[in-house]
Structures are given as C-alpha cells and as structure tokens.
Amino acid sequence: MKKIKRISAIIGVILIASMYLISLLSAFFATEKTPGLFLASIFSTVVIPIMIYGFIATYKWVHRNDPDVSKETDKPDNI
C-alpha cells in the first residue's frame, strides 16, 4: 500500500507542477489561451489531490478483506 501511495503522490506532484509550468510559460508568451490555462491549473490544483484520495480510498475499500502482505514480506528468509 505504501508503494501505491508513493506512486500516486509522485504522479500528482508531476501533474500539478506541469500545469503550473504551462501556465507560467503561456504567461511569458501572452497568448489568447493564457486565461484558460491559468484556470486549468487552478482546477487541477484542487481536483488532482481529490482524485488521488478517491483512488486510494476506493482501493482500500475494494481490498479491505485481503490479508496483510507486508507482514509476510518483512520476515527474513532464513527463519
């Protein structure tokens, strides 16, 4: 579960950072798409973390009866 959370967090950070980078670059070049890109970055700042939380909550709900695999993998091989 920790790997899934870590991967989700990295993907979320990359998506949010890329939206801000696109907004910054479009502001420098001042195109007609700049206001739309800025609104998209604000929207992504709010929606992407909510979606990641929803995916993690859904995963926990779907796999709530699975045995805890992390306890089995923490044991040394020579025991």
Image (cartoon, grey):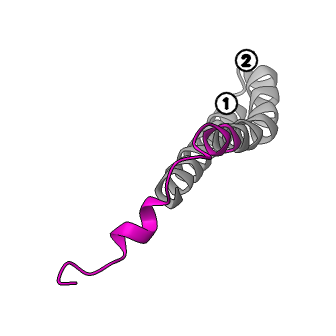
Does the magenta segment cover residue 76? yes
Q: How many marks?
A: 2
Whether 76 is drawn above or below 49: the answer is below
Give the side of residue 59 with respect to residue 51, left or right.
left
x then y, percent, for residue 23: 69, 35
Write the residue at 73% across / 17% down.
33
Whether 17 is drawn above or below 32: the answer is below
x then y, percent, for residue 12: 61, 45
For the residue pair 52 and 68, the one nearer the viewer reads as 68
Residue 48 sits in quarter: top right
* The magenta segment: 57-79
x then y, percent, for residue 7: 49, 51
Label 2 near label 1: C-beta < 8 Å? yes
Give the side of residue 30 with respect to residue 13, left or right.
right
Q: Which residue is mark 1?
A: 26
Write the residue at 64% across / 44% down.
56
Task: Give the number of the disc on residue 33.
Answer: 2
Q: Report the amino acid beneath label 2.
A: Lys
Write the residue at 67% across / 37% down.
58
